Amino acid sequence: MESSIVWIPEELEIALNLKQQFGADAEFVAGGTLLQTNWEKDQPIPLYLISLERITALQGFKKETSEGGPMIQIGALTTLAEIIQNPFFLSNLPLLAEAARSIAAPAVRNRGTIGGNIAGGTGDTIPAFLVMDAHISFVNGTEIQQKPLEDCLKEGILQDGSILVSIDLFETGGQKFFKKVGRREAFTPSVVTIAGSCRVNSNKEMEAIRLAVGGGSNQPCRLEACEKLLHGNILSKELLEKLFLSIMEEFAASSDDFYTADYKKTIAANVIVYEMARFAGQMG
């Protein structure tokens, strides 16, 4: 097997210049867990690997105040294991910790980074980030830019040679849930990953609703039509029935070698309806 040439820059600008120089022959790498999986599937090995592990701008995490209010900024090199184990995340972002805990085995989580899980475009943390209204700071030129994760996914920004610098989370409030449905075998993709959040006002009307799906071969996205169906309404049996049908219609699940799209839609619909009903029960 032919080996790659590994570059280990210490500055963002140098990493970007290397990518521009080598083009399609080069690929950024952090923890390397996704690349290892691809190699095991006999996918081509990039001629050049540009390691990001020494770039300090991608490291660390903090809570601060921004123009949008209180914000938690997570460096893209933060490992999944750190998110699961560090009291900061367990206290401030329990939904993210739950999502990270569902990914692969401990050895993979020790190496895999949160930036890599997002940059691949189908990571299991993405639905959780979508319901937390995550914004992405990235650089593909001379300046760091920030956009909603949802827009980055739609525009393919994370696959165009940009470097993900950090994930920026603003306080959204409300109750949240995360559910990953997968096969028993280790290291296989999830069947479907689901996350949601909701707040109920003094009139018991639902607001600030976010529902997101993804996982496996499914393209991560929010279920915006379903959110609109619920917004401003009081949850009822009739509304839950409509929600089930709306999820079946809106969720563009993909079939694979093991499960049909309809099966994945049904799983997502059942999980979301159950969780919304549970929310209603908890909120009285």
Image (cartoon, rainbow, N blue to C red):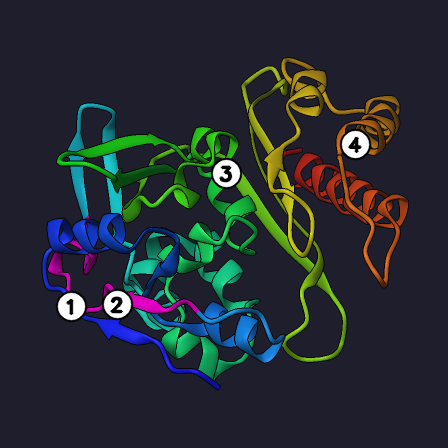
Q: Which residues are magenta?
A: 46-62
Instruction: Name the quadrant containing residue 151.
Output: top left
Amino acid type assigned to the residue bearing label 4 in the image: Ile
Q: What residue is disc 3 on?
A: 130
Amino acid type assigned to the residue bearing label 2 in the image: Ser
Indicate which disc, 1 or 4, sits on the residue closer to the N terminus.
1
Circle on res. 51: 2
- Which label lies toward us, 2 or 1? 2
At horizontal 76% and vertical 76% (from top left) the residue drawn is 184
Indicate which disc, 3 or 4, sits on the residue closer to the N terminus.
3
Dot 1: few (<14), some (14–19), or many (≥20) neighbours within 10 Å? some
- Which label lies toward us, 1 or 4? 1
- Which label lies toward us, 3 or 1? 1
Q: Are marks 2 and 1 in contact (CB under 8 Å)?
A: yes
Circle on res. 247: 4
Q: Position of residue 152 (x, y in %)?
A: 43, 34
Q: Position of residue 117 (x, y in %)?
A: 46, 58
Please tell me whether mark 3 sits on a helix, a strand or a loop.
helix
Q: What residue is disc 1 on?
A: 54
Left or right of 14, for residue 80 = right
Indicate which disc, 2 or 4, sits on the residue closer to the N terminus.
2
Query: Of 215 and 229, which appears nearest the observer?
Result: 215
